[in-house]
Amino acid sequence: MSTSLERYTDRFEQYADRYPRSVDVVLVLALMGCATLGSNLTLPGADPPDQDRTAIVLMGVSCLALLKYRAHPRTAVVVTAVCTVIAIALGYLLTPLLLGPVMAALYWLATLTDRKTTRVFGVTTMAALMVAAAISDSMDSVPLILRTVGPFFWLLLPLAAGNMTRLRRAYLASVQARAEHAERTREEEARLRVTEERMRIARELHDVVAHHMALANAQAGTAAHLALSNPQQTKKILTDLTGTTSSALRELKATLGVLRQNDDPASASLEPSPGLARLPELVSACASAGLTVTVTTTGEPRPLSPGVDLTAFRIVQEALTNVTKHAAADAAHVRIAYAGSRLLITVSNDGPDTTGTTDTSGASGTTDTTGRTDVAEAVPSRGFGVMGMRERAHTIGGELRAGPRPEGGFEVTTALPLQPSAPQAAPQAAPETARQAAVAATDVPAGGDES
């Protein structure tokens, strides 16, 4: 029953919002009819007052004042209350029909104004009408308690109904506001997730493409230099160049395959993410490009989570790529240490610093007493190499420092937790999330002029 009543009330409110003036005129005419009828009612055996036209005029004024209840609800209450008090003082019987205009004015006052205003005007109006009913000559035969209690309850009814209507509207408005806020929050969260996935894919593509292309470029340059003086070595380098480009294509295909992967469980599984186990392949590829890499491991090797393993490999790969591209050195050193709960990785070369105060990421920074440049204090330039390594390390709760060494050359040092300290993205992106960011990722550069 209450549901049906609420449905009809909602329909009436919608119609009233669409045609407010028409609804107001109809309600005022109905109240005018009720008040006129009420002015003709008397107690059994009592004579009606002689001022019939006066009652009609008073009720007409009070009903006309109701036409302005939307803009001036307080004025409407005062005018209707004064007209009703005058009618009672003239000897008209106080009935619910005669109270119709003032009851409507109190309802709209409670609906449109705050609680304090409703309380002040409502109590004042109820007191005035109760006093008028108590001293009226039209109800001398009625006990005083009935004369006052009746108007009190009749006027309390519209005040309670108006308060309920106001609270219901406030509740609906708050529900709508929460729904809109939740919708905005979902959209912002979706945009944030797409942005994060876009950057992750850009970082992955940069690591794959920049490393292999740098090695391929170095191998091709070495082969061109030795083509006439050492044909056998040139042939070997060209063979390694074929392996480098094939490896690049495989990793690129695996990365892009995630974006195209569907939800079919029968689809072919993707190649596992690279890790430190593939470090010998990386060393061999660098050797074919003319860079000798030595790897030293200290401490007891422990199994790494997929995220840490991938991050460690990518940092070593990027650091060696920078040595191949930017350093005038023919040797690099990779030191891996398992110390407590941390994995310490240092990649350095002994060549002269060819970049001055600028590191291989194109960022200029200040060198501390140890000769290292803190990447966090560096001013970013065009490169993405060191910036990408630092982002990877921070993603799993690690740290990274990069800068020139006092004795010459360049050094990258990172400390990674053996277990990630914060939730991280899986090495292979979830198909749905990756596909959502696929279009956006195609606009992100895989690297700058420097890696």
Image (spheres, grey):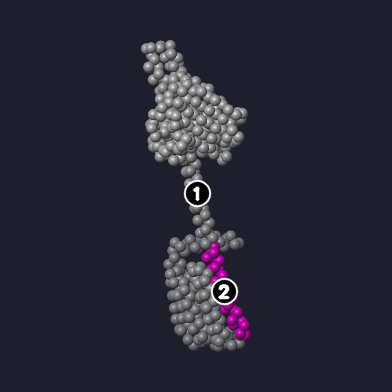
11 is within the stretch colored magenta: no
| Marks 2 and 1, the one that precedes in the sequence | 2
Which of the 4 quarters of the picture holds residue 237? top left
How many angstroms separate mark 2 from mark 1 (CA)? 43 Å
Q: Nearer the viewer, mark 2 or mark 1?
A: 1
Q: Residue at point 53% right, 37% down? A: 398
Q: Residues within 10 Å of mark 1 (few under 14, many from 20)?
A: few
**Whole-percent x, y for residue 142 in the image:** 61, 85
Q: Residue at point 50% right, 45% down? A: 189
Q: Secondary structure at mark 1?
A: helix
Could you tell whether 360 is left or right of 272 in the image? Answer: left
Q: Nearer the viewer, residue 371 or 433?
A: 371
Q: Amino acid at mark 1?
A: Thr
Task: Please say if 134 is above or below 31.
Answer: below
Q: Secondary structure at mark 2?
A: helix
Whether pointer 2 and pointer 1 mark residues with C-beta atoms closer than 8 Å, the reply is no
| Residue 305 showing in the rendered view | no
**Whole-percent x, y for residue 317 in the image:** 48, 28
**Whole-percent x, y for residue 119 in the image:** 53, 73
Prevalent SS, magenta region: helix
Q: Which residue is mark 1?
A: 185
| Residue 84 showing in the rendered view | yes
Q: Amino acid at mark 2?
A: Leu
Specify start and end residues of the magenta stretch as a single range: 143-169
